[in-house]
Amino acid sequence: MTPLLFLASIFSLIFLVREKTGWFSIFYLTFLPFIVFSGISPIHLTASLILGYLLFCLFSKPSFYYFSLFVIILITSIAIVQPRNGLDLGMLNAVNAQRGEHPGYESLLLPKLLHNKSDLFHSYINNFDKLLSPVAIFASGFWHNISTYYPLGYLFPWDLYFIYRFFKSKTISWSRKSNLYFLPSLFMVLMLSGFVYIDQAEIYAFAVVYFLAILAFLGYSQSSVKTKYLFLFINSIYLVYHLVVTSYFPI
């Protein structure tokens, strides 16, 4: 856990310096549940945090420079991770065994879609349900390998309100460059999050989560000082509680 917290603190400091945010960002972007409890390796978490921060840069200040950096990091992560298709061998064998059973399989589009594409959508829906659905992000996503009933998401439950607060403030205006650079970058990460094996998909899903965490913090930073201290206390108690009571992460 220590290397992950160290990485998260480095990125929160970078965010503080580059975006000129207050010291609250250090806590908020360091001790988020998905970082504290992430089981992925430090190098994979680094890729997630870089991609997530570049997504924010492309969202707030879209440019070809940031887009180029994003593509380079994404390609590098793919080369390191070497992701494999999210379908398990049993499902692939079942699909292959059924090929040709529909009349006109070789010439008709619908049978081909049924036996070659629907299985990919199954993988996509499964990954999104466990990693990027609202319930997973804000309620119980972290525990997808253990139990869906543990109330701990990748972000704090109340971060949904702060994300709403950020968009309500309209601090960032949408532009044509956003369509040109941000949307394709987000699309690429979401595709990888859905179509690769779920343990590898976490790397790209976490990038989206970190992007949302930054938006949540910006919404949080617009609150009054009393509100900031209140949620600083709530977030701390929330994390300590899960660390203490959960046998999976004993203190």
Image (cartoon, grey):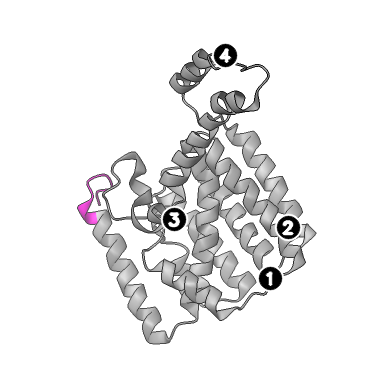
Amino acid type assigned to the residue bearing label 4 in the image:
Gly
Q: Classify mark 2: helix, strand or loop.
A: helix
Amino acid type assigned to the residue bearing label 3 in the image:
Leu
Disc 4 or disc 3, which is closer to the eye?
4
Residue 23 seen in the figure: no
Residue found at x 53% / y 66%? 214
Rate crowding at label 1 as few (under 14), some (14 to 19) or many (20 or more) other CA atoms within 10 Å: few
Q: Position of residue 75 (x, y in %)?
A: 69, 41
Rate crowding at label 4 as few (under 14), some (14 to 19) or many (20 or more) other CA atoms within 10 Å: few
Which residue lies under the disc numbered 3? 5
Depth check: give the residue in front, 232 or 60: 60
Q: Is residue 140 left or right of residue 116?
A: left
Indicate which disc, 4 or 1, sits on the residue closer to the N terminus: 4
Indicate which disc, 1 or 2, sits on the residue closer to the N terminus: 1
Q: Is residue 193 left or right of residue 150?
A: right
Residue found at x 30% / y 40%? 146
Indicate which disc, 1 or 3, sits on the residue closer to the N terminus: 3
Which residue lies under the disc numbered 4? 100
Is 38 magenta? The answer is no
Magenta span covers which residues?
244-251
- Spatial CA distance of label 1 from label 2 is 12 Å
Q: Classify mark 3: helix, strand or loop.
A: helix
Residue found at x 55% / y 50%? 48
Q: Position of residue 158 (x, y in %)?
A: 37, 68
Q: Is residue 66 left or right of residue 245?
A: right
- Spatial CA distance of label 4 from label 3 is 52 Å
Q: Classify mark 4: helix, strand or loop.
A: loop
- Spatial CA distance of label 4 from label 1 is 48 Å
Which residue lies under the disc numbered 1? 174
- Spatial CA distance of label 1 from label 3 is 33 Å
Rate crowding at label 3 as few (under 14), some (14 to 19) or many (20 or more) other CA atoms within 10 Å: some
Whether label 1 touches label 3, CB < 8 Å: no
